[in-house]
Every structure is written in C-alpha cells, then in structure tokens.
Image (cartoon, rainbow, N blue to C red):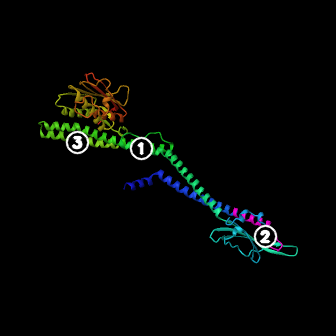
Amino acid sequence: MLLSDRRTDAVRSLSARLLLSLFLLLMVFFGVTIVALDLVFRDLADRSTRELLDAQVLALISASDVDAHGQITPPANLLDTRFANPGSGLYAEIRSAAGVVLWRSPSATGTGLVFEKAVAQGQRRYEALRTANGAEVEGLSAGIHWELNRNSAADFVFSVASSREPSRAQLARFRGQLFLWFGGLAALLMLSVAALMRRVLAPLRMIADEIRAVEAGTIGKLSSDYPAELAGVTQGLNALLESERSRLERYRNTLGNLAHALKTPIAVMKSVLGERQEPGSRDRILNEQLARMADIVQHQLNRSAAAGGTTLGQAPVAVLPILNELRSALLRVYSNKDIVIRVVCEPTLAFLGDRGDLLELIGNVADNACKYCAGVVTAEARMVAGQPNRISIAVDDDGPGVPDGAQERILERGVRMDESAAGHGLGLSMARDIVAQYRGALAVSNSALGGARFTITLPGIVTEDAR
C-alpha cells in the first residue's frame, strides 16, 4: 500500500511528470540522432571502402604488363604489400574474358574467394562476397580491353576485394562512443533540468509548506514574497483565508452577542418567577420578555445576514421608550442591589436606525453601569450642540470607574476590569461594533457621580412622529 501511494505521488508530481516527459523526448531525439549518424557513418565507411577498391584496381591495372607469352602479370614490388600476405584482408585477381584465372594474389590463397565471372568491357561491378570461413568482403571487378600489340587485343577482368572487418570494427567503436557521449549528454541534461526545475518550482513548494502551516495554525496567511506569476494565486488564497476567518469570527461573535443579549430577559424572567405576584401580572411580564427574546433572536439573525448600520429608509425610533423599557427590565434584574436609575430624555428625540440596534446598544452599556454601580445610574439623551442630525446618550454610574489608560481596552471583546464579577466581557465590545456600524462614537470617561461615563453619539433628529 505504501509503495502504491509513493507511485501515485510520483505520478501526480509536476516535477516527476516534466522529468519523465523530458526523458522520453530526449530518448526519441537522441535515438533519431544516433540512427541518423550511424547511417551517415556507415555510408561514409562504404564509400571509403569503394574508393579504396577503386584505387587498388587502378594500381593493379597500372602495375600489370604483358609478358613474352602474352599473359598479364603484375610485378609484386609495385603492388600493396598486403597482396603478398595470406589472410591480410586485401585480395586481387586477374581473369581472362573466358573466366580463366591468369593471376591471383598470394593473400587470396586458401580464402575460397570467388569473383563474378562475366564483366563486360568498360563495366565496373561492386559485389558483396564471402570467404570460405564466412568472412564478408567487398569486391570490385572491372572489365578492361587491353591491346597486346598493334595487331591484337584481349579482354581481361581485374578484381580486387577488401575485408569488411576493419570498417565493421571501426563502426562498432563509433557506435560505442556515440552511445557513451549521448548517454552522458542526456544524463547531464537531465541533471541540469532537474536542478533548474527544483529552483523554478521552489515557490510552489513554498506555497505547499505555507498552506500546511496555515492548516496547522502556525501562521495566519501566506507571505507576499512570490514571483509575479504566483502573486495572484497567493493573494486570492489570502483573501479566501481572510474571508473564511472573518466569517468564522462573525459567527462566533453572533453567537456570543445572542447569548449576551438573551441574558437580561432571562434574568428578568427568573426574577419574576421568584417573586410573589398576581398570576396575570406575572404572565404579562413573562410574555413581554419572551417577545423580547424572539425579537433579539430575529435581530441577531438579520444582523448576521446584513451589513447593518444603514440609515437610509429607516423610520425615526423614539429614544425615551427604549430608555424606559430598559430601566424597567434592569430594575428587575438588579433588584437585589436596590439601585436607582434616572432617565432624562425629551419625548421628541429620535434615533435614525434600527430599533433592535439601539435597544441592544443602550442595554449593554446600561447593564454594565448597573453591574458596577454603588446605587445610582443615570441615562441622559439630548441633541449634540453644533452637530445637526446627531444625538448623544450618556450613561453614568457611581461605581469605582475605569482606571486611567484602560478606557480603550475595556471596549475590546472579552476584556473585563473586574474578573470577580459575573460576565464574559462582550457587552461593551458589542456596543462599540454597533456604534461603528452607524459611524458614531463611543467615549469612556469619568462621571460626575464618581464612576464611569459612557457617551454614545449616533444619527438622530428631533421629531414629533418618532415611534
């Protein structure tokens, strides 16, 4: 199984595919080249052999002469010494037109070599011959019309043969060198290409390593130090990673916001169930809180599906009813602290935005104030002086306040100044996110009551039609 996986990885490897393709291409190219060079070399060897035979025939004819008996006999001292050595590989013979052997070189003794008998005058004939022991030789026979004297002439056949063994041995050496050099060249090219591909494909291996690191959680995104051809890929992957990270973060935040927003209605319901009240009054309060919980769930779902924060097409939302609703709920939640919540707001003051956003925003800030106050919380809403279409909502408490330098840090998600107090540190970060959606402002400062002051600036107007 492991071997099969390795083979599969090798086939899927881009480097392996390229090297294999290049190897096959080189084998085809070098194979065709070797065959072509072999054919050229063999043709040259054959030409060289025939040129040698031509020269030897001419030398044989030039050295031959007619003796007193009318026979042609070449003197031995004028011929190639190989004709005098038996088995030297160079053979010669002179025949009459009738095929009678007039002279035969000593080198042809015992070879059993037989030349073509009939060769017409003026013709030249090349032929492949074999000796008695099967050795291949190349032969050339030339028909010559020889004038013996002024009154007579005769036809003769001059034949010369040369062994093919030297040319075959030379061809074998050439082929060996050819395979050696081309094999070495192919190996050198493959090594060079492999090294070049390793360098060229290094960015791809780096991407694979960084993707594994992202999967392992050791890095958050791919680096930007890549060639231009891969920059688009890495940028797209980083955008996808960031989008996925933002989506997961948004889902986590939505779940945390939902849980935090449901905390107050649940606390009110628990408080009502623990008190002795008229059944009708208790049912009304429970139904109100259940309806509020349904609104909160629907509001969070809408926020997770939309960008939020838009003020176009929004009907003005009266601020005072929101403050009074929250005051009633928080007094029930913190009934054990016996706190006082004062609300200061004109009935005509209205918020330009979603009612659920305003309820969640002020509810989180006011809940934080009630949690840390000593006994007094105030919520005051008014128009911002010199800024049309802007309202300010200030929530003060008489608690310990916020330490210097921590005003910005307490707005971060999961941060709490007092770890002993109940909570998860989500309320103020949720408030900051809602304010940011409406391009507003959330400032933390010291309150005149001695505790903290949270000042919220949002889009708003003064109208008699606020609902």
Task: Give the residue at mark 2.
Answer: 73
Return the mark for residue 291: 3
The answer to whether any part of residue 465 appears in the image is: no
In the image, 273 versus 141, the foreground residue is 141
Q: Name the quadrant containing residue 382.
A: top left
Image position of 207 (left or right of 330): right
Name the one closer to the observer, 421 or 63. Answer: 63
Question: Residue visible at 24% across and 43% down?
Answer: 294
* Residue extent of the magenta highlight: 48-73
Residue displayed at 40% across by 44% down? 211
The numbered dot on residue 209 is 1
Q: Residue at x 53, y 57 (%)?
A: 24
Name the residue at the right extreme. Answer: 150
Residue 63 colored in magenta in the image: yes
Q: For the N terminus, give its image quadrant.
A: bottom left
Please tell me how crowded label 1 is: few (under 14), some (14-19), or many (20+) other residues with Cα within 10 Å: few
> The residue under label 1 is which amino acid type?
Asp
